[in-house]
Image (tube, rainbow, N blue to C red):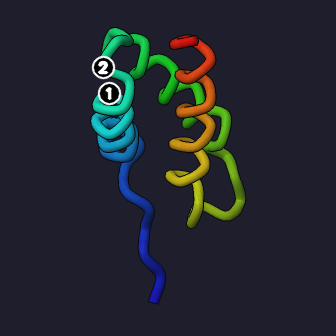
Amino acid sequence: MTHEPPPAEKTIAEIVERLSAKFPDLPEATVVEVVTESYNELADAKVKDFVEVLVEKQSKKRLKALNA
């Protein structure tokens, strides 16, 4: 049984929601931009199972650097 990954918009929105809560001092537009960039960098990955986790981890690292 093959399952399709959620649409990019849904994945991005879910990650933005979680990271906006972790970084309340950053504008939501900044979080959206960082998450979208991270997602786009990994969107062509051959194995899609971990894209969401990797996008969130990469975005979190970038947001920490911006928030420092």
- The residue drawn where x is 43% and y is 67% is 4
Q: Is residue 6 above or below residue 22?
A: below
Above or below residue 31? Residue 12 is: below
Q: Which residue corresponds to the image point at 49% horizontal and 29% vertical from the top-left?
A: 35
- Which residue is at the front of the view, 3 or 61? 61
Q: Locate residue 64 relative to residue 24 in the image: left or right.
A: right
Secondary structure under tag 1 reads: helix
The quadrant in which residue 10 appears is top left
Which label belongs to residue 20? Answer: 1
Specify few, some or many for label 2: CA neighbours under 10 Å numbering under 14, 14-19, or 20 or more. Answer: few
Whole-number angstrom distance, CA of label 2 to CA of label 1: 6 Å
Q: Position of residue 16 (x, y in %)?
A: 35, 32
Tell me the residue that label 2 is attached to: 24
In the drawing, does residue 32 fall left or right of residue 36? left
Foreground tag (2 vs 1):
2
Query: Whole-percent x and y of residue 65?
Result: 62, 17
Rendered view: 65 above or below 21: above
The amino acid type, in three-letter code, at marker 2 is Pro
Horizontal and vertical percent for residue 33?
A: 46, 17
Q: Quadrant of the N terminus?
A: bottom left
Please identify the residue farthest to the front as the structure is shown: 68
- At a point 51% along the width and 42% down the height, the residue shown is 56
Quarter of the image for residue 17 reads top left
| Mark 1 residue type | Ser
In the image, farthest residue toward the right: 46
Crowding near pointer 1: few (<14 within 10 Å), some, many (20+)? some
Q: Is residue 20 above or below residue 6?
A: above
At a point 67% along the width and 64% down the height, the residue shown is: 47
CB of mark 2 within 8 Å of CB of mark 1?
A: yes
